[in-house]
Amino acid sequence: MEKLNLESSIKITQAAFEKSQQLNTAPLTVAILDSGGAVISLQRQDGASLMRPDIAIGKAWGAVALGKPSRLLGQDAQERPAFISAINTLAQGNIVPVAGGVLVRNADNEIVGAVGITGDLSDVDEQCAIAGIQAAGLVADAG
């Protein structure tokens, strides 16, 4: 699949949840956004806590809004805290700069959206996002 749409989003979510089962993670929440930052799909596993949908969207939204994976935004937050703080103020607090927000690219290397996952350790969230994106035949850009 070359596009990020509802069909590919369902595949991404299912594969991410399968990876979650393999890794025995805490309950995850998966947000999938298009290249304009609009939510295509938002699913959470039973037991996911109250803030998880907002966190998952924030990871994905920050990635697509700034054109870089949330892992790299986290590095920027450590190296240039004033910049990320200012950007997050402009974004009305909607950027979550930690791993788990992965850009989705097509075969032409164009950004077609982002996947944000939260619920476990950020590195584990990111692994599940990558597995989901690859299962849908798209390219995961985690930085």
Image: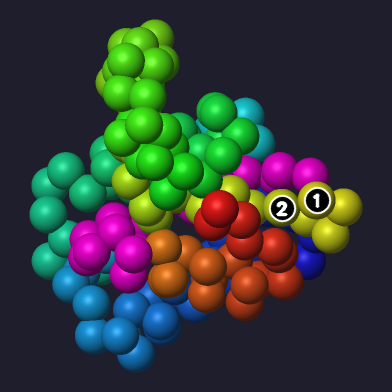
Image location (x, y in percent) of residue 69: 51, 45
Name the kind of residue labelled 1 in the image. Answer: Asn
Residue 67 visible to an observer of this rendering: yes
> Circle 1 sits in a helix, a strand or a loop, which is it?
loop
Q: Which colour scheme is used?
A: rainbow
Task: Say which of 143 and 54 sits in front.
Answer: 143
Residue 39 to residue 92: above or below:
below
Image location (x, y in percent) of residue 126: 41, 63
Give the labeled residue for mark 1. Answer: 109
Q: Residue at x 63, y 72 (%)?
A: 134
Image location (x, y in percent) of residue 124: 32, 70
Name the kind of residue labelled 2 in the image. Answer: Arg
Task: Say which of 98 and 16 sits in front.
Answer: 98
Q: How crowded is mark 2: few (under 14 residues within 10 Å), some or many (20 or more)?
A: many
Residue 104 to residue 75: above or below:
below
Quadrant location, the N terminus: bottom right
Residue 39 visible to an observer of this rendering: no
Image location (x, y in percent) of residue 138: 71, 64
Find residue 105 and name its label.
Answer: 2
Q: Give the range drawn in magenta.
A: 110-125
Contact flag, marks 1 and 2 (Cβ < 8 Å): yes
Location of residue 142 by image quarter: bottom right
Q: Mark 1 to mark 2: distance in Å?
A: 5 Å
> Circle 2 sits in a helix, a strand or a loop, which is it?
strand
Location of residue 87 by image quarter: top left
> Which residue in the rendered view is the most extreme toward the front?
79
Question: How many numbered callouts?
Answer: 2
Residue 75 to residue 143: above or below:
above
Q: Residue at x 39, y 41 (%)?
A: 75
